[in-house]
Image: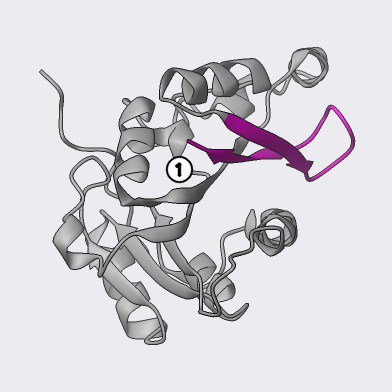
Amino acid sequence: MMNTNSTCEYFYTTAESGHHHHYIFPALKKLLSTIKTNEDRQLRVLDMGCGNGSLSNLISKEGYEVVGIEESLSGFTTAMNSFPECKFIHANLYDIPYSDLGGDFDIIVSAEVIEHLVYPRELIKSARKCLKSNGTLILTTPYHGYLKNLALALTGKMDNHFTVLWDGGHIKFFSVKTLTKLLITEGCNNYQFEFTGRFPYLWKSMLVLASF
């Protein structure tokens, strides 16, 4: 039987941007700019696992209507109090209250969330239910590949990287191949990868733009 808790209960004390935003947001902003619509209207973005709302705020400053979903009560409260220009919903990512969303979304963003989830497929399923028929999902997650894994092993940094002592830390470690397989099994018919942070093949994170 599935445990309905999608993430560990994180505790947020500030509305400051996460340490990863400085290298993820420029790449995310670039991908967002490639998504166009024939309609003359503001595009709607759903930020799944929005934390304290800081990334939702950055996205909204680019001209998007943003709704953020967060399971952590402290994250939700911080976001609500700090970024009134966005809408925030306190909810489990596996059980989103769709009637509260105000309609479907052109774009769904989930940044550095999927690696924390016991059931990553459920994130994709939930996202698809919230997307418009021609909508786009953008996922970001730490990059893993042969050269990076080898470098971590040779430099003795494996223990630190796999964060086993971090309650609620990373429990899934995706490569391009495994993330692609996950998306395809959930109905993805088109995808594009981008990479960010550090040097080629030692990247910190990867972003995938996917449609269904």
Residue 192 part of the magenta segment: yes
Q: Amino acid at mark 1?
A: Val
Name above or below for residue 149 compared with residue 108.
above
**Which quadrant of the figure has residue 176?**
top right
Total marks drawn?
A: 1
Q: Is residue 51 left or right of residue 129?
A: right
Near mark 1 (Cα within 10 A), the count class, few <14, some 14-19 or many ≥20, is many
- Asked whether the viewer can see residue 50, the reply is no
Please name the residue shown 68% across and 30% down the image. 143
Please name the residue shown 55% across and 28% down the image. 189
- Which residue is label 1 attached to? 113
* Most distant residue in the right direction: 199
**Which quadrant of the figure has residue 89?**
bottom left
Please name the residue shown 69% across and 36% down the image. 192
Q: Is residue 197 left or right of residue 49?
A: right
Find residue 109 and report its horizontal and vertical position in percent.
Answer: 50, 53
Name above or below for residue 18 compared with residue 116.
below
Find residue 183 and report its horizontal and vertical position in percent.
Answer: 50, 26
The prevailing secondary structure element of the residues shown in magenta is strand
- Asked whether the viewer can see residue 75, the reply is yes
Residue 102 part of the magenta segment: no
Find residue 207 and report its horizontal and vertical position in percent.
Answer: 65, 41
Please tell me which residue lies in front, 143 or 192. Answer: 192
Please tell me which residue lies in front, 132 or 116. Answer: 132
What is the magenta range?
190-212
SS category of the residue bearing label 1: loop
Tell me the quadrant of the picture where the N terminus can be found. Answer: top left
**Which quadrant of the figure has residue 146?**
top right
